[in-house]
Image (tube, rainbow, N blue to C red):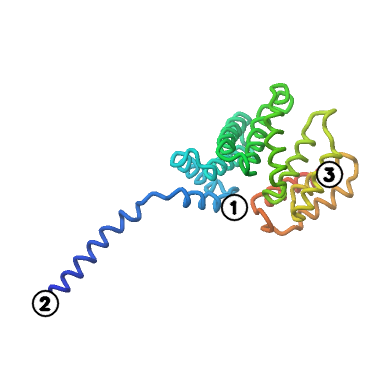
Amino acid sequence: MLGAVRRSAVIALSIAAALCLPALAAEPPTVAELVARLDALHGRRDDPAALAEARGLADRAVALAPNDYDVLWRAARVAFTDSDVPGRSTDDRSKLGKQGYDLAQRAIAANPNRVEGHYWAALGIGSYAEGMGVVRALANGIQGKFLRPLERATALDERYDHGSIPAVWAAYYLELPWPKRDRDKAAEQCRRALAINNANLRARFYLARIANDEDRPAEARALLAEIAAAPVGRYDAPEERRVKKEAAALAAKVK
């Protein structure tokens, strides 16, 4: 009899535990779990499904922790990434870029002494300006909103994001309208990026653009060949894949 009672008790406890499992599985993720998942998804951001998931998780994280620095700069990163999808309409690019900039500004308010908020603020307002058009953006005073966070990010940690900060400077000097465009400064920034991360394909691509624009096609072709031959995954696979596509398109135009 005692054995039967014990068996009944064990069965009852097992059933109770099984009934509790769905409740445990339904526990919402913590802020730390959302942040970790956003970082993992960033490594697959050129997959539309991964980007869509990241956008949803970023919104949840901001709603859960609206003043958390680590949440805000990652949400800004997601908004910028969404704005920067190839083929995005200019209106959507501007809208999403502004969202990223606003989120990054909130991150800066939460902690002005870390690089991430400033960096993603610069990229976000850059997308906003790109959607407007460079000349119109300059006329509307957007340049200062771009340069201030980029200068601060450079001062805090120029090595951030695999040496991308000097590459962003290079893009700035290349995209300025004539006569403000400065290919010499752009090339100098590309060399700085490569000194930080010799695998940086974006810096090589900009150097190839400069060489082609300055009628040095052999140099441009050599740089583009380096990009084509480079293995993916040395520092940022989605960025590397994107640069390879851009380099292939430019290679087809080099005379």
Looking at the rendering, in which quadrant would you find the C terminus? top right
Neighbourhood count class around disc 2 (C-alpha, 10 Å): few under 14, some 14–19, many 20 upward: few
Residue at position x 77%, y 55% in the image: 198
Where is residue 65 shown, x and y percent of the image? 46, 41
Residue 152's image quarter?
A: top right
| Between marks 1 and 3 in the image, the one whose residue lies nearer the viewer | 3
Q: Earlier in the sequence, mark 1 or mark 3?
A: 1
The residue indicated by pointer 1 is 43
In the picture, residue 10 is in which quadrant?
bottom left
Position of residue 179 relative to residue 12, above or below, is above
How far apart in space, not on screen, are marks 1 and 2 (Cα)? 58 Å
Amino acid type indicated by mark 2? Leu
Corner quadrant of residue 151: top right
**Mark earlier in primary sequence (3, 2):** 2
Q: How far across and how far down the image is residue 100, in percent? A: 58, 36
- Disc 3 marks a residue whose amino acid type is Glu
Local SS, label 2: helix
Tell me the residue at 85%/28% (across/down). 179
Q: Which residue is mark 2?
A: 2
Query: Identity of the amino acid at label 1?
Result: Gly
The CA span between labels 3 and 2 is: 85 Å
In which quadrant will I find the N terminus? bottom left
Q: Residues within 10 Å of mark 1 (few under 14, many from 20)?
A: some
Q: Return the residue at label 3.
A: 188
Nearer to us of marks 1 and 2 is: 2
Checking the image for residue 79, the label placed there is none
- Pointer 1 or 2: first along the chain: 2
Q: Position of residue 55 (x, y in %)?
A: 51, 42
Answer with left or right where residue 4 lies relative to residue 38.
left
Identify whether 229 is placed above or below 216: below
Looking at the image, which residue is at 74% across and 54% down? 197
> Do the residues bearing badges 1 and 2 touch, measured as CB atoms within 8 Å?
no
